[in-house]
Image: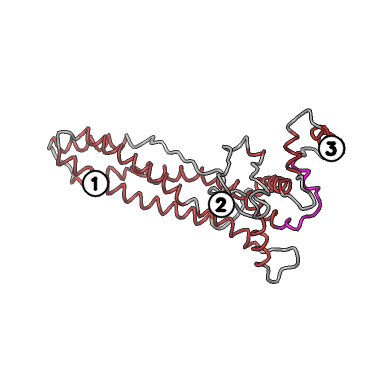
């Protein structure tokens, strides 16, 4: 999150608590930055009959849907890569088994390609369904969401510069890593004092919550909620999508022995003593066995589609 539209007024600061969880992210520039004054203006414009200092949830939802909509392209790219590798794998295997039977090989390729295309369309429908579900924000893991929201709230408050506070709290936090600095000693004294009175588990960034009220507090709280929701939802999304593609496309090739039935029907294989028919049936069994265990991996951006908050 950047304070105002002043490129020299502030720079992106990565949350320290994420350094051990995700790959470090550093934006190249501010072209996709979400500015706090824009958030505040949007929140004010959304107010209708709410009481003062209360802002409609639609503001938070708008920002959430913006970054979730960006997941469509990387997920489709993942699916296309898996589809391409699967088709290549099947083609190579069929070609090896039907090297001496050109017409039969082409027919098997055609039947399997048509079936994979049908499964692919069904898989894309599943992908669209999961994205549509994510576009309706809902935190099923409320505790995890709340923990991240508190962490991002403290991080944003510590980073937001105020006119009366030219040396921000974030600058002081940077000095905390120097164990020989006065800031390190002073903060440790505060943290130890809080621990003595029963307030344990306090982090240095949590001290930003003690700063005086800020006119942009509402915007900071909105974006802390947005960023926390992203942190929770993308983890679940990146787990379910590869499993879904694996289940619907890869394992779907022979669920309930459907692929074998499709090949039998497509090739016209029935009860017959013709050796060619036995060769076809044997190949079908090999094709089916070799579609199992196909690996599926996914990697989505660990920040909202390049947007830095």
Residue 190 got which mark? Answer: 3
Horizontally, residue 272 falls left or right of residue 29, namely left
Choose the circle earlier in sequence order: 3 or 2.
Answer: 2
Q: Dot 3 surroundings within 10 Å: few (below 14), some, or many (20 or more)?
A: some
Specify the quadrant of the image occupied by residue 169.
Answer: top right
Q: Is residue 216 left or right of residue 305?
A: right
The residue stretch that appears in magenta:
205-218
Q: Residues within 10 Å of mark 2 (few under 14, many from 20)?
A: few
Q: Position of residue 10 (x, y in %)?
A: 67, 47
Between circles 2 and 1, the one closer to the viewer is 2
User: What is the distance, in whole Å, between disc 3 and disc 2 at their CAs?
Assistant: 37 Å
Rounded to the nearest angstrom, the CA distance separating label 3 from label 1 is 71 Å
In the rendering, which numbered label is found on residue 111?
1
Q: Secondary structure at mark 3?
A: helix
Frontmost of labels 3 and 1 is: 3
Residue 32's label in the rendered image is 2
Depicted 35 relative to depicted 100: above or below? below
């Amino acid at each position: 999150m950047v304070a105002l539209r002043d490129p020299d007024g502030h720079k992106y600061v990565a949350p320290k608590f994420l350094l051990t969880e995700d790959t470090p992210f550093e934006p190249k520039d501010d072209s996709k930055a979400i500015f706090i004054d824009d958030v505040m203006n949007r929140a004010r414009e959304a107010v209708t009959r709410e009481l003062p200092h209360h802002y409609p949830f639609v503001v938070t939802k708008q920002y959430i849907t913006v970054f979730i909509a960006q997941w469509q392209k990387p997920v489709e790219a993942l699916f296309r890569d898996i589809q391409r590798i699967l088709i290549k794998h099947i083609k190579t295997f069929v070609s090896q088994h039907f090297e001496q039977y050109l017409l039969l090989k082409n027919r098997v390729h055609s039947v399997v390609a048509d079936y994979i295309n049908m499964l692919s369309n069904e898989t894309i429908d599943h992908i669209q369904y999961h994205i549509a579900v994510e576009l309706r924000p809902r935190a099923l893991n409320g505790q995890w969401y709340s923990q991240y929201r508190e962490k991002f709230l403290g991080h944003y408050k510590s980073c937001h510069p105020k006119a009366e506070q030219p040396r921000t709290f974030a600058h002081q936090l940077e000095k905390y890593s120097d164990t020989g600095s006065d800031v390190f000693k002073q903060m440790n004294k505060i943290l130890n004092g809080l621990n003595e009175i029963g307030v344990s588990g306090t982090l240095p960034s949590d001290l930003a919550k003690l700063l005086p009220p800020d006119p942009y507090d509402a915007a900071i709280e909105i974006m802390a909620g947005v960023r926390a929701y992203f942190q929770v939802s993308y983890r679940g999304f990146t787990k379910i999508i590869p499993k879904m593609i694996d289940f619907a496309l890869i394992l779907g090739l022979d669920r309930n022995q459907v692929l074998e039935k499709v090949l039998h029907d497509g090739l016209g294989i029935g009860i017959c003593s013709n050796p060619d028919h036995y060769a076809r049936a044997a190949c079908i069994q090999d094709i089916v066995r070799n579609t199992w265990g196909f690996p599926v991996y996914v990697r989505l951006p660990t920040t909202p589609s390049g947007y830095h908050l």
